[in-house]
């Protein structure tokens, strides 16, 4: 129960990676504020903020759901205030909410370009901006953003320019925040998977069941997040981590149990390799 009494604020936590991180931190004693847009389950996606909180509470943790579209600053402010009112502070911020659009320039609709930047860049910035005053008061404050290492090889940028620059922007914010908040001891790191992760996005947009079988479970990112967030914030900041490297540093090298198909082939994720 290493996170007993600590409060984690997690965006996009209705399902998938965000939900897995929420459940992992709750297992370690954290209070978890689950924010997201989903309050009614979509059969294609599964999960809502309320179903995740129900699972947290049933497991003995303390969760609180707040419906929030991070594109709306008033909703972000309300969600942060609810976290403070219910739990008294924020110690951990996980910027997980993200929109995906794997299309080239000619096939990227302007409204889709705007969406990925409104959520991935502007939304991540706004959530962090409004959490920082409370992170400053924490004994071991962490910002963890789900974004990739920055590789300027055009092979990663050219196929999906709109999406890639939005995700790289998230990583650039991590590097900037690490320096900006160094003097007050707020850590800022990013985390990205080496392989694809079995989420609704993979099943619905990136290859369906075939790709899902070549993926790992969200648990690998939840465990990696746990190991990052337990580190001293003044000693662990400014990193664009890959999940395998985080686990390897903890002496965990057998990752087969994270695979959807143990022993089977794995698909490398974007921006890796």
Image (tube, helix red, strand yellow):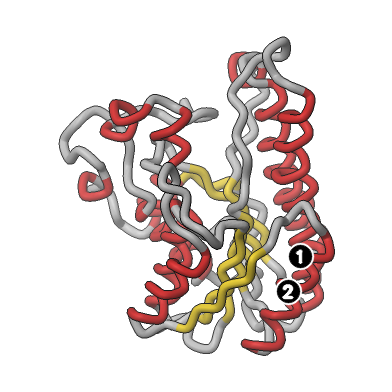
Residue 240 rendering spot, x and y as whole percentages: 59, 46
Figure quadrant of residue 116: top right
Q: Is residue 213 left or right of residue 125?
A: left
Q: Give residue 80's quadrant in the image.
A: bottom right
Which numbered dot is residue 151? none
Q: How far across and down, in percent of the image, does residue 211 sit?
A: 34, 28
- Gap in Å between the C-alphas at discs 1 and 2? 6 Å
Mark 1 residue crowding within 10 angstroms, few (<14) / some (14–19) / many (20+): many
Q: Position of residue 157 (x, y in %)?
A: 66, 20
Quadrant containing the N terminus is bottom left
Q: Considering depth in this image, is 182 or 90 the residue closer to the camera? A: 90
Q: Secondary structure at mark 1?
A: helix
Q: Nearer the viewer, residue 223 or 206?
A: 206
Give coordinates of residue 266: x percent, y percent: 30, 30
| 110 is higher (above) or lower (below) than 237 | above
At x 55% / y 62%, what residue is drawn?
Answer: 39
Task: Name the mark on residue 76.
Answer: 1
In the image, farthest residue toward the left: 263
Give the residue displayed 71% in from the left and 72% down from the top.
79
Do callouts 1 and 2 mark residues in contact (Cβ within 8 Å)? Answer: yes
Q: How many marks?
A: 2
Relative to the observer, which residue lies in front, 234 or 47? 47
Q: Is residue 259 left or right of residue 112?
A: left
The image shows residue 27, relative to residue 251, as above or below, that is below
- Residue 264 in the image: above or below residue 108: below
Circle 2 is placed at which residue position? 80
Q: Residue at x 70, y 44 (%)?
A: 120
Secondary structure, mark 2, is helix
């Amino acid at each position: 129960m290493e996170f007993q009494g600590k409060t984690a604020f997690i965006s996009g936590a209705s399902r998938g990676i965000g939900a897995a991180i929420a459940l992992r931190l709750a297992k370690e004693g954290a209070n978890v504020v689950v924010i997201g847009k989903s309050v009614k389950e979509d059969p294609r996606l599964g999960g809502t903020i309320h179903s995740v909180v129900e699972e947290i509470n049933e497991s003995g943790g303390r969760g609180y759901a707040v419906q929030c579209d991070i594109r709306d600053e008033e909703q972000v402010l309300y969600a942060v205030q609810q976290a403070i009112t219910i739990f008294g502070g924020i110690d951990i911020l996980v910027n997980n909410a993200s929109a995906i659009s794997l299309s080239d320039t000619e096939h990227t609709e302007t409204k889709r370009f705007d969406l990925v930047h409104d959520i991935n860049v502007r939304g991540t910035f706004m959530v962090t901006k409004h959490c920082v005053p409370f992170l400053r008061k924490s004994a071991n404050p962490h910002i963890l953003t789900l974004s990739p290492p920055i590789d300027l090889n055009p092979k990663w940028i050219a196929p999906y320019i709109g999406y890639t620059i939005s995700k790289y922007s998230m990583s650039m914010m991590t590097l900037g925040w690490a320096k900006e908040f160094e003097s007050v001891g707020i850590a800022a790191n990013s985390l990205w998977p080496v392989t694809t992760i079995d989420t609704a996005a993979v099943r619905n947009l990136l290859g369906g069941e075939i790709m899902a079988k070549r993926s790992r479970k969200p648990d690998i990112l939840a465990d990696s997040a746990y190991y990052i967030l337990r580190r001293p914030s003044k000693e662990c900041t400014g990193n664009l981590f890959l999940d395998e490297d985080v686990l390897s540093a903890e002496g965990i090298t057998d990752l087969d149990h994270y695979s959807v198909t143990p022993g089977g082939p794995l698909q490398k994720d974007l921006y890796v390799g």
